[in-house]
Image: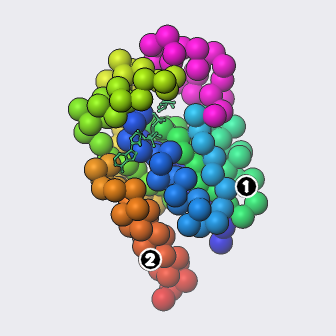
C-alpha cells in the first residue's frame, strides 16, 4: 500500500528535515506543509501573530486532499499540533501514520532563533507549545526524539513502518 505519513511537531522540531529524508527513502512525494499556508496566515506569522483554528482549517483541508490524492503516496510535513487537526487529516486519509517529533521548548527556541531568514519568528515558539496536544496514545503514532540525528530518525521510522506492514499482513 502506498505510504501516507504525517511528520508533525512544533516549529523547529525538525519535521521538514526528516520528512524530506523519508520521502527519498520511500521513493514517494514530499508535501511541505509550510508551502501551503494561506497568504494571510504567512503574514500573521511574519508579524509575530500565532495562527488560530480558523487560519488552520482551510490549510489542513488542502493538505488532506494532497496527501490522499498523491499517486504513489507521500510524506507530509505539517505542525498538526492539536488532536482535532490530526482527526481532520485522518478524515481525509483514514490509514494515516503519524511521526511525532518531540522537542524540548528550549531546544525549539534555539533552533528557530538560529535561522533568522525564516518567516517564523522565535517569539512564536512558546505559542506552539501552548497549542500542542502530543499525539501519544493515538493510533498509528511513533514518537521520535528531536535530538537524534536525522539519519537515525529516518531509520527508526522505516523500521517502524516495516513492522506495521508485517503486522497488517499477519506475519
Ligand atoms: N535531528 C536534528 N538534529 C539537529 N538539528 C536538526 C535536526 N533536524 C533538524 N535540525 C535543524 O533544526 C532546524 C529546524 O529544522 P526543520 O526546518 O526541519 O524543522 P521544522 O520542524 O520543519 O521547522 P518549521 O516547521 O518551523 O519549518 C534547522 O536548522 C535544521 O537544520
Ligand atoms: O500550525 C502552525 O502554527 C504552523 O504550521 C507553524 O507550526 C509553522 O508553519 C511552522 O512550524 C513554520 O515554522
User: Mark 1 falls on what kind of element?
Assistant: loop
Residue picked out by circle 1? 70
In the rendered structure, find residue 24 and report the number of the disc placed on it. Answer: none
Q: From the viewer's perspective, is 146 left or right of 29? A: left
Q: Is residue 71 above or below residue 170?
A: above
Kindly tell me whether residue 96 is visible in this rendering: no
Viewer-proximal residue, 96 or 107? 107
Q: Is residue 121 above or below residue 164?
A: above
Residue 3 position within the rendered picture, expressed as x and y whole percent measured from the top left: 61, 64
Q: In the rendered image, which quarter contains the N terminus?
A: bottom right
Q: Residue furthest bottom?
A: 171
Label 1: few (<14), some or many (≥20) within 10 Å? Answer: some
Residue occupying the point 40% across, 62% down? 151
Residue picked out by circle 2? 163
Kindly tell me whether residue 158 is visible in this rendering: yes
Viewer-proximal residue, 3 or 42? 42
Residue 37 belongs to magenta span: yes
> In the rendered structure, which segment of residues is drawn in magenta?
35-58
Residue 41 belongs to magenta span: yes
Amino acid at each position: 500500500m502506498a505510504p501516507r505519513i504525517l511528520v508533525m511537531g512544533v516549529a523547529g522540531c525538525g519535521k521538514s528535515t526528516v520528512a524530506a529524508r523519508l520521502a527519498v527513502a520511500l521513493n514517494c512525494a514530499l508535501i511541505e506543509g509550510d508551502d501551503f499556508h494561506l497568504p494571510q496566515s504567512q503574514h500573521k506569522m511574519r508579524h509575530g501573530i500565532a495562527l488560530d483554528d480558523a487560519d488552520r482549517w482551510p490549510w489542513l483541508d488542502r493538505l488532506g486532499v494532497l496527501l490522499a490524492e498523491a499517486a504513489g503516496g507521500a510524506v507530509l510535513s505539517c505542525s498538526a499540533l492539536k488532536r482535532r487537526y490530526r482527526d481532520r487529516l485522518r478524515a481525509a486519509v483514514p490509514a494515516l501514520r503519524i511521526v511525532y517529533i518531540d522537542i524540548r521548548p528550549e531546544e525549539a527556541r534555539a533552533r528557530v532563533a538560529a535561522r533568522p531568514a525564516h518567516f517564523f519568528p522565535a517569539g512564536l515558539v512558546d505559542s506552539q507549545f501552548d497549542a500542542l496536544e502530543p499525539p501519544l496514545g493515538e493510533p498509528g503514532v511513533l514518537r521520535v526524539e528531536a535530538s537524534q540525528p536525522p539519519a537515525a530518525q529516518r531509520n527508526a521510522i522505516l523500521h517502524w513502518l516495516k513492522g506495521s506492514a508485517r503486522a497488517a499482513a499477519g506475519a
